[in-house]
Image: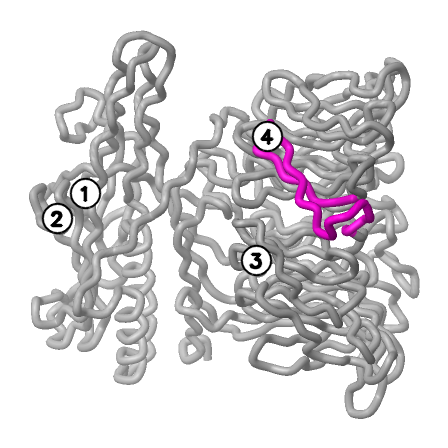
């Protein structure tokens, strides 16, 4: 048996993820603090096509020349092998950070290197047609070779067909080891080649190679600096997940590749590839679009949603949402995007209704879903879920017994470092104050009694933000609403005196904290801070208020910060230069949160001679781009979301000379709005998104609507994006 061994900075096992039914896996609370995510370098350029371009070309040639369906099926298996191998190897990058530095001590140990060992796998249980076994582990004895007792994970890349069954023009892939000292890969690596088997011998010869790609090993982990025995360099396993998530494609296969490093909102080293950890993606799909109307939760004309029960969120490309049934009231549901793949996630309150997310909404942090709920026994407390019924539990009973702490009632729930933060009342008489809860240990801690005695500080009511390892949030101290910072202790950032109004969410821009406040001298203006020092940016230069409350908020676009000042949309650059984008536009934001798509922001606004309609800005200019209702009539834009490069808008417009009511439209920078869903045909309004708005999950758009006979129920519309990571296999599907 031929063996090949080389070192890389991150390697691992192909692990399964949740399937179409609600996932069933135990909660792992052993995560570590999130490391910074390193940039993945681009592959070296050459004269040949990229692997992805060649794969698509190979697929087209093979499908055009295949004389039988057997060849086509074999091709699908081979293209899966090719893309799986390529994307998986793509993630083998320099992911060993240097050891941490402490205070005055010995030099820390060198970080352990992750090693990769590839062996040919004979036909058998693991690979029916043979393939390769990929073993990974840490170089414990630092000899540069991976021994069997150092192997931590093993994955298999299997051949699609036996070589003797391969037909002419079948797609093949070939792997070769690159030794150290190579001019492109100094530390060695892997050469991935792909092409068509022109002679049908089952081997990819040199003249058949159509594309190649080098994947280089990273350098050995650096030594720790002077410190208290610096920690060894951290290694995180690469993971491949393979599933058929219906929100991405109801009839097909999805392959994701990434590193279990806890980037973004994910949890590190939990053996689950979460959305924020994905580096590359490939989808083989047999459908271009799909459309589902979900079953009624309330039979008849009754609504299955209400203003107190319409929370929705994309959780690992499942839709998790709240809905009402006559028997259980408002509870939590999970859906993979199909009617059959939808079920109650957990009936939290067996004797009544839990009304999950009724105060704080739904929030994802460290791979878990956080929300408030009332189980009928412990009152309304903080809960979490890993997407399974068994993994949906109460996180902390802050007000012991049947009383409710009402977590997140003011300011919701915010994730920072390895904890979640929220306002809660422990029932001791100090009112609602800020709490933190460690996502690993589930230990809750009171940050401090900011508003003395029994008054509530309403922590986070005007926003939360993370900057430089510190948490910043608004809170009422008994005299005014000020900004506070928290790391290991609590400190006040501002002290402006009397009641101070901050209507915009706290925003991080150019590594500074931005917010609006009234210092009792300059009116309500824009401020920024490095976390210690405060600087005023007086937009009008006098003591009047420049900033006006609206639904536009503060948006970051193309390196600029956009917000409304004195009724006008403005941009601010990193040099604090203010640009008036279009003074003729008013009512910026309207009643709908904006959407960002294709390098531009879409929002509601009012033109000089129009009602509130659809507007657009690239940060340099702004304009009204479409009137759904002509003249001074408002289009009543209520919800917008981006999906697949398009902007989906709920608006009342004119279609075929008839008023539509609040229905669903689609538009882009290169196309005019098109009516794509009408809940009630004609002049009747389907009230699309009246409860919960529009929610994008994977390639699927979810919303509620009223067809006039069933009340407000759930609908799903999906489209396969036209990009290189999503391949439509329509011929095979037929």
Work out how far the residue at label 4 is from the one at label 3, CA to CA, in angstroms. Answer: 23 Å
Q: Can you identify the residue that label 1 sits on?
A: 118
Which secondary structure, mark 2?
strand
Q: Can you identify the residue that label 2 sits on?
A: 177
207 with respect to 418 (left or right): left
Work out how far the residue at label 2 is from the one at label 1, CA to CA, in angstroms. Answer: 10 Å
Work out how far the residue at label 3 is from the one at label 1, CA to CA, in angstroms. Answer: 45 Å
Q: Can you identify the residue that label 3 sits on?
A: 557
In which quadrant will I find the N terminus? top left
Query: Residue 73 location in percent, x, y?
Result: 34, 71
Q: Nearer the viewer, mark 4 or mark 3?
A: 4
Query: Residue 383 location in percent, x, y?
Result: 72, 32
The range drawn in magenta is 524-547
Q: Can you identify the residue that label 4 sits on?
A: 531
Q: Nearer the viewer, mark 4 or mark 1?
A: 4
Residue pushed farthest right? 301
Q: Which residue corresponds to the image point at 56% horizontal and 48% vertical from the top-left?
A: 316
Q: Which numbered disc, 3 or 1, marks the residue that appears first in the sequence?
A: 1
Q: Which residue corresponds to the image point at 67% horizontal and 51% vertical from the top-left?
A: 554
Tell me, yes or no, whether the two marked residues, 2 and 1, touch with CB atoms within 8 Å: yes
Which secondary structure, mark 4?
loop
Which secondary structure, mark 1?
strand
């Amino acid at each position: 048996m031929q063996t090949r061994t080389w070192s890389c900075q991150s390697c691992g096992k192909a692990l399964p993820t949740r399937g179409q039914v609600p996932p069933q896996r135990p909660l792992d609370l052993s995560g570590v603090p999130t490391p910074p995510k390193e940039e993945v370098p681009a592959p070296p350029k050459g004269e040949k096509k990229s692997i992805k371009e060649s794969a698509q070309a190979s697929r087209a040639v093979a499908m055009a020349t295949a004389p039988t369906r057997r060849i086509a099926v074999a091709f699908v298996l081979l293209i899966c092998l090719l893309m799986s191998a390529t994307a998986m190897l793509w993630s083998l990058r320099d992911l060993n950070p240097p050891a941490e530095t402490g205070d005055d001590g010995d030099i820390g140990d060198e970080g352990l290197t992750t090693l990769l060992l590839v062996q040919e796998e004979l036909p058998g249980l693991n690979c029916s047609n043979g393939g390769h076994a990929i073993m990974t582990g840490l170089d414990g004895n630092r000899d540069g070779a991976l021994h069997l007792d150092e192997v931590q994970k093993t994955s298999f890349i299997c051949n699609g067909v036996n070589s003797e069954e391969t037909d002419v023009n079948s797609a093949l892939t070939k792997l070769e080891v690159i030794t150290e000292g190579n001019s492109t890969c100094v530390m060695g690596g892997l050469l991935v080649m792909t092409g068509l088997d022109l002679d049908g011998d089952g081997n990819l010869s040199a003249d058949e190679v159509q594309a190649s790609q080098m994947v280089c090993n990273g350098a050995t982990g650096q030594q720790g600096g002077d410190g208290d025995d610096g920690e060894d360099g951290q290694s995180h396993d690469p993971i491949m997940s393979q599933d058929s998530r219906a929100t991405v494609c109801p009839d097909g296969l999805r392959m994701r590749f990434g590193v279990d490093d806890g980037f973004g909102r994910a949890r590190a080293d939990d053996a689950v590839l979460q959305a924020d950890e994905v580096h590359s993606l490939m989808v083989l799909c047999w459908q271009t679009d799909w459309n589902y109307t979900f079953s009624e939760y309330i039979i008849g004309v009754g609504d299955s949603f209400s203003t107190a029960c319409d929370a929705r969120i994309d959780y690992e490309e499942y839709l998790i949402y709240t809905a009402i049934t006559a028997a259980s009231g408002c509870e939590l549901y999970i859906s993979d995007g199909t009617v059959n793949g939808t079920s109650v996630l957990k009936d939290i309150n067996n004797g009544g209704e839990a009304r999950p997310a009724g105060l704080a909404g739904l929030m994802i942090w460290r791979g878990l879903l956080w929300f408030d709920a009332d189980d009928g026994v412990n009152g309304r407390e903080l809960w979490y879920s890993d997407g399974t019924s068994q993994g949906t539990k109460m996180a902390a009973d802050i007000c012991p017994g049947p009383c409710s702490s009402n977590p997140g009632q003011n300011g919701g729930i915010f994730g920072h470092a390895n904890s979640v933060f929220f306002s809660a009342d422990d029932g001791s008489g100090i009112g609602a104050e800020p709490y933190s809860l460690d996502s690993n240990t589930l230990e809750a801690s009171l940050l401090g009694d900011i508003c003395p005695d029994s008054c509530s500080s309403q922590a986070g009511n005007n926003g939360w933000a993370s900057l430089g390892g510190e948490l910043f949030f608004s809170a009422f101290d008994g005299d005014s609403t000020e900004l506070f910072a928290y790391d290991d202790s609590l400190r006040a950032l501002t002290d402006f005196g009397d009641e101070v109004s901050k209507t915009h969410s706290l925003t991080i821009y150019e590594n500074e904290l931005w917010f609006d406040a009234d210092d009792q001298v300059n009116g309500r203006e824009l401020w920024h801070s490095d976390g210690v020092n405060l600087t005023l940016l007086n937009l009008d230069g006098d003591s009047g208020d420049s900033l006006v409350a609206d639904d536009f908020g503060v948006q970051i676009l193309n390196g600029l910060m956009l917000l409304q000042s004195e009724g006008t949309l403005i941009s601010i650059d990193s040099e604090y230069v203010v640009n008036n984008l279009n003074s003729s536009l008013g009512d910026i934001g309207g009643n709908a949160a904006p959407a960002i798509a294709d390098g531009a922001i879409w929002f509601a606004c009012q033109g000089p001679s129009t009602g509130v309609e659809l507007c657009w800005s690239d940060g340099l200019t702004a304009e009204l781009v479409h009137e759904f209702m002509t003249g001074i009539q408002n289009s009543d834009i209520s919800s917008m979301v981006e999906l697949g490069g398009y902007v989906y808008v709920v608006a009342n417009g004119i279609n075929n000379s008839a008023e539509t009511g609040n229905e669903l439209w689609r538009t882009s920078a290169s196309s005019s709005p098109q009516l794509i869903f009408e809940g009630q045909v004609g002049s009747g309004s389907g009230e699309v998104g009246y409860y919960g708005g529009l929610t994008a999950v994977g390639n699927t758009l979810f919303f509620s609507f009223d067809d006039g006979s069933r009340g407000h129920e759930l609908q799903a519309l999906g489209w396969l994006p036209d990009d290189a990571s999503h391949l439509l296999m329509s011929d095979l599907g037929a």
